[in-house]
Amino acid sequence: MRQAKRRQSRLGIRPSVSGNELGTATDFLPRQVRRRLGLMATTSVAALFAGLILATPVPADAANFVCDWTSATSSTWNIAGNWSACNSTFPNNGADTFDARILVDGVYTVTLSTNVTVNSLVLDATGANINHNASTLTLAGGGPITITSGTYNLNGGTISGATIQQTGTNRLVLGSNGGLTGVTLRGDLVTSGGTLAIASGLTLLTEAGAAPGTANLTNTSVAFTNTQTFNNATVNLSGSFGSTLAVDGNSTLTLGAGAVVQ
């Protein structure tokens, strides 16, 4: 019996310990073994944290795509197959941003009938037309719409926050009705009928960007909504049915000293 007790003591057998007593439980081990165990524990914790960091998804950076209309074929804006270099979609800002270009010459129409936001739009295609109806095209950050060749037909649609650069007879054309919200128009505003709704201000400039600009309105009604000031422009009203400048509802329009209506 005494020999068994001596053997038990010599072997260093101790009662089981909890995790909180781990340091005490390993005190009896040789120093090198204890060091190795400590290193293994530290390494395991570091590896665990590294794994968690690597496993955490990192959101992809937003990209900007310059999208080109692919052919001289009439179709609608919101079909991905009509655009190239467009990340397999059509130009409309979201997680990514887009610049849209219509550059293919030919007689065809691009129909825009869904709300779209882009950074910029270039229409430089002889014979091409944009038919914008029943939707809003927003230019992010007041971006440009550049009409170098072709026609932009506003037939029920609204352009918001854009600087529109016209070139000679390549211009914005008002159909039955349309809207301009916070727009700067470089080049004469020329209409031959219909109703144009103006919101959040309209700035008219020459093609070169100088003031005052000019509006030649024939058989056209221009309605100003909300509170705004119209200045530094000459408005010529004509037509057998007459043209008018109107103020909707409880809106207020202030004509600045540089505004001439005749």
Image (cartoon, rainbow, N blue to C red):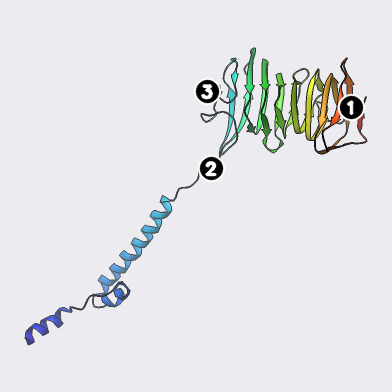
Q: Which residue is mark 3?
A: 81
In the rendered image of this protein, does residue 13 appear above or below residue 37? below
Write down the quadrant of residue 139 in the picture. Answer: top right
| Residues tagged 1 and 2 counted as in contact (Cβ below 8 A) | no
Q: Which residue is mark 2?
A: 61
| Residue 98: mark in rendering | none
- The disc, 3 or 2, on the residue closer to the chain's N-terminal end is 2
Report the residue at 30% width, 70% height from top: 35
Query: Which residue is farthest bottom?
Result: 2
Of the two numbered discs 1 and 2 on the same chain, state the one appearing first in sequence.
2
Which residue is most to the top?
A: 107
Q: Residue at x 7, y 87 (%)?
A: 2
247 or 110, which lies in front? Answer: 247
Q: Residue 66 vs residue 156: left or right?
A: left
Which is closer to the viewer, label 3 or label 2? 3
Could you tell me which residue is drawn at 8 percent across and 82 percent down? 4
Residue 171 shows up from this direction = no
Q: Quadrant of residue 247?
A: top right
Decide which of tag 3 and tag 1 comes sooner along the chain. 3
- The answer to whether 213 appears left or right of 153 in the picture is right
| Quadrant the C terminus occupies | top right
Against 48, is 215 above or below?
above
Residue type (three-letter) at the residue carrying disc 2: Asp
Q: CA distance from mark 3 to mark 2?
A: 24 Å
- Residue 29 percent coordinates (x, y): 23, 75
Indicate the quadrant where residue 147 lies: top right
Q: Are marks 3 and 2 in contact (CB under 8 Å)?
A: no
Dot 2, crowdedness within 10 Å: few (<14), some or many (≥20)? few
The amino acid sitting under disc 1 is: Thr
